[in-house]
Image (cartoon, coloured by chain):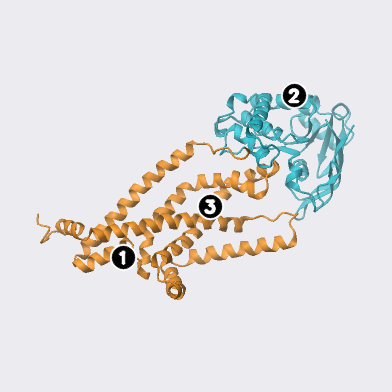
Amino acid sequence: MQEILRVEHLRKSFGAHQVLNDINFSMNKGDVITLIGSSGSGKSTLLRCLNLLEEADGGAIIFHDTDLLASHVDINKMRQSMGMVFQSFNLFDNYTVLGNCTLAPLLTKRMTDRKEAEALAMTYLKKVGMDDFAHMRVTRLSGGQKQRVAIARALCMQGDILLFDEPTSALDPESVGEVLKVMKELAREGLSMVVVTHEMSFARDVANRILFMSAGDIIEDATPQELFTNPKDERTKQFLSRFIN
Amino acid sequence: MNIHDPQSTLERVLYLLVNYYPFFLQGIKITLLLAVVGTFFGLIISFILVGMQSSTIHFKDRIGVRVVRKILRYVAIIYIDVIRGTPMVVQAAIFYYGFFSRYSQNIVIAGLIVVSFNTAAYLAEILRGGLMGLGHQQMEAARSLGLNRWQAMRYVVMPQVLRHSLPAINNEFITNIKDSAVLSIIGLGELFYNGRAASSKSYFTFESYLIVAGIYLLLTMVLTRVINFMVAYIDRRPAKEVGGR
């Protein structure tokens, strides 16, 4: 398997508060990794560090054989290959659904032909079931619809990895299903994903690896079957028992 | 009613309007010029001030870039404090008598400079408020797609900030119509100055200022509604898609 991402000794603190202690893991092409753990365990911070939305204090993030924390790396170019989907969607309210999807590919010159960019956007919007809403203002969409557009927007960059930061946490139960269905489909197609989630069913059914985090450390790195049937650490057991009960 | 030998207030008002209308028309012209052009250039300067004030420092920035950004931020903060902390009439007097009049006698240009730079400080605070209201998520979402800071500001953040700030910008424009009256201190023939000239020539002081007040009221009422209509129109339309051929 081809390794596309490796994190080595990643550290991050906010002032005196150490959020990530010594994070190490690697990811192969096509992997679906879910990060689980209690609130404040550092899952979202880790994800944001991967995309350099947060400044790591030390360590290395090797993406396609390049350390992203090295000073010479063009972060804009790198981010084009590592999309991100946020908990609160963060769609650009001043554009239509289609405008949201074509803006970045065209501005970053990943695509130069508007018609081509629109055709690609329509393909991804169709994939997430939002092609009928292409010309609508995003402010008129429901939460689930917004998140599906956000996924299509990230897909339009045709990157190698997609990062999801609690993509269903701000949604009602019905919309959660819509979004998870899209994510499952993407996982089935072989898209590499890192997903911070509280959706244990998604972690169990879709991920091929689960990283359980607690107090800034990765406590367990296991397959869903191992983690759910035979958790090794006491903290993992306690965390899972809260969900199961 | 005899307007050639006016006795009552109404007769005097009519007398002034018939005999001194060029004074009032010229005054309206200059007042509108100051408000429209002053607010327009003020808005442009305010964008620069906001850029100076809110440019964030990224950990990959070189030390020189960090220092320049910090200096620019403090320059903007001091500028805004000074302008907002002193009356425009004083600024106009200092600028014109202490500086501008040595090089030029063009009072209209001097007035436009004073209004533009004065209103820029207030508009910068309005835009900064809009920026804070929008939150950092839009910037993050744009950067996560690989847009650089300028593209994110230009195509995602500022259009939304501007749209949310339009009512407050409109308010600033209306304030400029009224407050430009203080530029009579440098002898600029705006509405108040010309009203005073009509009053000196006709000796109908009360009626002259009554007309001036009526014109200000009419201008502000009509323009407020026109702009509100325009704002509502703009608000209904999504932004034009950008980039590509």
* Quadrant of the rendered image containing residue A30: top right
Which color was chain B given? orange
Left of B37 or right of it: where is B217?
A: left
* Quadrant of the rendered image containing residue B212: bottom left
**Amino acid type of disc 1?**
Tyr
Q: Secondary structure at mark 2?
A: helix
Residue shown at the point (43%, 50%) measured from the top left: B170
Give me the C-alpha separation between circle 2 and circle 3: 42 Å
Residue shown at the point (64%, 44%) measured from the top left: B137
Q: Chain of mark 3?
A: B
Residue that numbered label 1 is attached to: B193
Spot occupied by residue B165 in the image (x, y as percentages of width and height): 50, 48
* Quadrant of the rendered image containing residue B232: top left
> Closer to the camera: disc 2 or disc 1?
1
Residue that numbered label 2 is attached to: A185
**Which chain is rendered cyan in the image?**
A
